[in-house]
Amino acid sequence: MPLHELAALAAAFCWAITGMLSKDSADALGPFGFNRLREGMVTAMLAVIVVATGRWHGVGYDDFSRLALSGIIGIFIGDTMLYVALVRMGPRRSGALFSLNAPIAALLGWVVLGEDLSIRALAGVFLTTCGVAMAVLGRTGRAGGHRFEAVHGPIWAAVGFGLVAATGQAAGSLIARPVMATGFDPYVASLIRVGVAVTCITALMALPIPAIQQRGRITARLLGMTALSGFIAMVVGMTLLMFALQGGYVGIVSTLSALSPILILPAIWAVTGERPSAVSWLGALLRCWGWG
């Protein structure tokens, strides 16, 4: 498998495990408070890497504006809505919904960029949607009593947040692709995207709206878990995705980076000690086969 495709697959593995790492912290701090803390820590990590390795050589206005817009849509909106879905329906279901970013990217390419969408691609969108529906709505298996499988509030609302998250990720990748195709440094690109996103989150949370405020107090354990989650998902995972976009096709990269629904099932099995249901496995396989 080519290097750029391997990078996309590695990014999927990073995102599969960080959903579980993030669950307790997102519950404790709320999705907005957790995302602000995590993206702030990730920005600091990336800044240290970029400065220490001398990667910053100046960025043109066009490249910066594209990456900033990608960060607003893909991270500020996309990631925040992902954590809202994570709090409401757990890492397995929210991860399955988030993986819809691959077919959504194809549909956006068709609508916005005028790219061809074959009958095979349309069939893939249909099969992917069916697979995600099975993964989200199907039986949870023996792990159903674990907190990772609990659903809080109406399932349709959680599904809506997950769809917004997937759409944000897809749109963010499409916007960043022309910049990354020129060989733009992936660490600098990640720094710009995350830095802009955390600035937007901080500005939003300054508004006197109770629903978007941080819920709990930041403890040493929450700080450590959030830092680990941010490092694996954003410093490693997102940078791998930016690298993959340098030389890989958006559709292939999106497909491989969206394999998290399959990768997360054995991880949940290991953590909970209970086997996911056959419906969960079938839904995950169908989702990936439909867009494979």
Image (tube, helix red, strand yellow):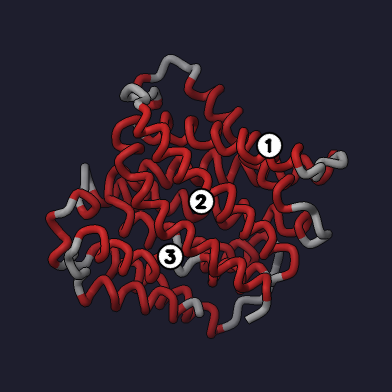
Whole-percent x, y for residue 141 in the image = 15, 67
Residue 237, relative to residue 36: is it above or below?
below
Which residue is found at the position 19% from the left and 72% from the top? 277
Which residue is found at the position 36% from the left and 64% from the top? 264
What residue did someone put label 1 on? Answer: 48
| Displayed quadrant of residue 64 | top right
Whole-percent x, y for residue 205 in the image = 48, 22
Marks 1 and 3, the one that precedes in the sequence: 1
Q: Is residue 26 left or right of residue 143?
A: right
Q: Is there any visible trace of residue 246 in the rendered image?
A: yes
Going by the numbered disc 3, the residue's amino acid type is: Ser
User: Which quarter of the image is occupied by the N terminus?
Assistant: bottom right
Which residue is found at the position 31% from the left and 24% from the top? 216
Report, in whole angstroms, how far the alpha carbon at label 3 lies from the one at label 2: 12 Å
Marks 3 and 2, the one that precedes in the sequence: 2
Mark 2 neighbour class, 10 Å CA radius: few under 14, some 14 to 19, many 20 or more: many
Residue 290, relative to residue 102: is it above or below?
below
Going by the numbered disc 2, the residue's amino acid type is: Ala
For discs 3 and 2, the disc positioned in front in the rendered view: 2
Report, in whole angstroms, how far the alpha carbon at label 1 lies from the one at label 2: 17 Å
Whole-percent x, y for residue 276 in the image = 22, 69
What residue did someone put label 3 on? Answer: 260
Going by the numbered disc 1, the residue's amino acid type is: Val
Report, in whole angstroms, how far the alpha carbon at label 1 lies from the one at label 3: 29 Å
What residue did someone put label 2 on? Answer: 233
Q: Secondary structure at mark 1?
A: helix
Residue 150, relative to residue 4: is it above or below?
above
Q: Is there any visible trace of residue 211 in the rendered image?
A: no
Whole-percent x, y for residue 66 in the image = 74, 45
| Displayed quadrant of residue 209 | top left
Which of the pair 216/126 is nearer the observer?
A: 216
